[in-house]
Image (tube, helix red, strand yellow):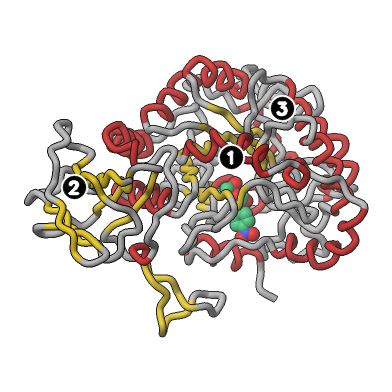
């Protein structure tokens, strides 16, 4: 049998479609059974207009900050002197760290350099419109003040502060939205919490410490649901998003229904497709890849790292270029999705400088060209994104999508934006234009100097200056009627 580690590695390295095997299993086994007797989520009962109103801010936002931060930032990828492969926040699982040893990290956690002000300001300067932070990851450590469980940052560390509260206050002050990631199913330090077996434990269960054994329903009812209640009620205007993760077969439709009953009490909340129990949630969540055509008819958000880990790893310096990050943002926007781009603060609360630098650069571009991203609709064309290979297959055996990087397009009611990665010589030509163009200019040109438009068949030619205005992406605006 293929191990989870292989699946995870494949998902991360070659951008396979992420389908949780266990979720598929849940759907297969229980889908019929849940059809009749199950708690209906708000998404299933609201009208299309109600849904549009609920999703409006999120659809306009297009760009958010993911923050993976927790105790795993202390080992930062190294345990017992050994570099532990795989993503940093998984170190407890990957190195089979006993519960007591992992919990012993808490008294060492004192991230005095953490500044909610600076992180929110960083997100804003990057042009991000919302933040989603790990309130509790798979390690079970709550990054907030929890009365429901003492393994948390206020009760179990010398820091004694609640960064979630500080972020909520700063987000309100600085006018940006805040959501909480919560690992509702995997919890490696709570009895009964689930654990993926990533292939290294030669054990009858997925647990590697008897302290993890217990009843999942009991874990869910005594820890996860009470903590979700705390998160949903203690932080004022927030959260606007709950970001669930890694559902397993433990999350039956009945148990997921208990979570949904709570979520339904917060009718403006947006939550993703990773709860489990057959619930589809509001958003598709492609991880570390951009789907070829987006998800027509579904809201979606691609979450990605800048290097190869979510949680801080001291030696992961494999950072993507600003060019790649910007192209990803534009590619995603042109397909109607959001980009949730991760930072991984270290154990002192500092954001790695390489991440800050890239975010500032992306923000600089958006400050000039944001009109082509925020609140836009997908491309009216489509072929510019690339094409399916007739010879190469992806790892599901389907024709491989080969992206092209000459240009992308986004739209609003009266504009077509063409984001040019490759600067054409002389003019930009488009074959079939479904609207009539009444004017054209470059978004980075403050004078909006009109560009010469020549009709050619069903398309147009737009005369361009000799040089691109931006080395990564220059935006051509077509005003249309
Ligand atoms: C999940 C988390 O496990 C990860 O730590 C991070 O929070 C990310 C945003 O979400 O990533 C996964 C989940 C499942 C698989 C791979 C990565 N999988 O089953 O292959």
Farthest-out residue, right: 37
At horizontal 40% and vertical 43% (from top left) the residue drawn is 413
At horizontal 30% and vertical 46% (from top left) the residue drawn is 480
Image vertical order of residue 321 relative to residue 198, above or below: above
* SS for callout 1: helix
Mark positioned earlier in the residue sequence (3 or 1): 1
Farthest-out residue, bottom: 391
Q: Quadrant of residue 426?
A: bottom left
Mark-to-mark CA distance, 2 and 1: 37 Å
The residue pinned by badge 2 equals: 471
Quarter placement of the N terminus: bottom right
Task: Looking at the picture, tell me which residue is in the foreground, 169 or 347.
Answer: 169
Mark-to-mark CA distance, 2 and 3: 43 Å
The residue pinned by badge 1 equals: 72
Task: Looking at the picture, tell me which residue is in the foreground, 375 or 144.
Answer: 375
The residue pinned by badge 3 equals: 231
Mark-to-mark CA distance, 3 and 1: 21 Å
Instruction: Tell me, yes or no, if residue 105 can be seen here.
Output: yes
In the picture, the disc for residue 49 is none
CB under 8 Å between discs 2 and 1: no
Is 340 left, or right, of 105 in this rendering? left
Question: Residue 457, how many percent across, how many down?
Answer: 22, 67
């Amino acid at each position: 049998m293929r191990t989870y580690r292989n699946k995870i590695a494949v998902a991360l390295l070659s951008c396979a479609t992420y389908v949780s095997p266990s979720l598929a299993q849940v759907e297969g086994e229980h889908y019929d059974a849940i059809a009749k007797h199950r708690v209906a989520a708000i998404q299933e009962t609201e009208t299309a207009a109600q849904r549009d109103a609920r999703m409006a801010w999120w659809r306009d936002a297009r760009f958010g900050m993911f923050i993976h931060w927790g105790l795993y930032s202390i080992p930062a990828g190294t345990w017992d002197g050994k570099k532990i492969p795989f993503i940093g926040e998984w170190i407890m699982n990957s190195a089979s760290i006993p519960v007591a040893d992992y919990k012993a990290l808490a008294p060492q956690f004192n991230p005095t350099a953490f500044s909610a002000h600076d992180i929110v300001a960083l997100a804003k300067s990057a042009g991000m419109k919302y933040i989603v932070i790990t309130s509790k990851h798979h390690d079970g450590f709550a990054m907030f003040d929890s009365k429901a469980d003492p393994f948390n940052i206020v009760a179990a560390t010398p820091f004694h502060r609640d960064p979630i509260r500080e972020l909520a206050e700063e987000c309100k002050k600085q006018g940006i939205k805040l959501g909480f990631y919560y690992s509702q199913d995997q919890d490696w330090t709570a009895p009964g919490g689930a654990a993926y077996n990533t292939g290294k434990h030669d054990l009858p269960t997925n647990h590697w410490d008897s302290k993890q054994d217990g009843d999942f329903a009991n874990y869910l009812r005594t820890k996860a649901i009470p903590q979700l209640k705390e998160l949903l009620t203690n932080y004022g205007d927030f959260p606007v998003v709950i970001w669930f993760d890694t559902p397993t077969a433990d999350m039956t439709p009945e148990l997921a229904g208990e979570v949904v009953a709570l979520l339904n009490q917060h009718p403006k909340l947006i939550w993703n497709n990773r709860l489990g129990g057959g619930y589809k949630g509001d958003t598709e969540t492609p991880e570390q890849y951009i789907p070829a055509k987006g998800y027509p008819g579904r809201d979606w958000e691609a979450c990605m790292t800048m290097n190869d880990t979510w949680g801080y790893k001291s030696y992961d310096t494999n950072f993507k270029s600003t060019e790649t990050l910007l192209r990803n943002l534009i590619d995603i926007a042109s397909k109607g999705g959001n980009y949730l781009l991760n930072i991984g603060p270290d154990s002192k609360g500092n954001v790695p400088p390489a991440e800050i630098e890239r975010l500032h650069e992306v923000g600089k571009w958006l400050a000039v060209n944001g009109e082509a991203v925020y609140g836009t609709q997908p491309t009216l064309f489509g072929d510019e994104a690339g094409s399916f290979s007739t010879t190469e297959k992806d790892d599901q055996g389907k024709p491989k999508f080969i992206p092209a990087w000459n240009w992308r397009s986004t739209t609003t009611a009266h504009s077509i934006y063409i984001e040019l990665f490759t600067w054409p010589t002389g003019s930009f030509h488009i074959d079939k234009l479904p609207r009539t163009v009444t004017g054209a200019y470059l978004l980075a040109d403050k004078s909006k100097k009109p560009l010469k438009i020549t009709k050619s068949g069903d398309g147009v030619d737009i005369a361009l200056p000799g040089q691109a205005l931006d080395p990564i992406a220059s935006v051509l605006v077509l005003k249309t009627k």
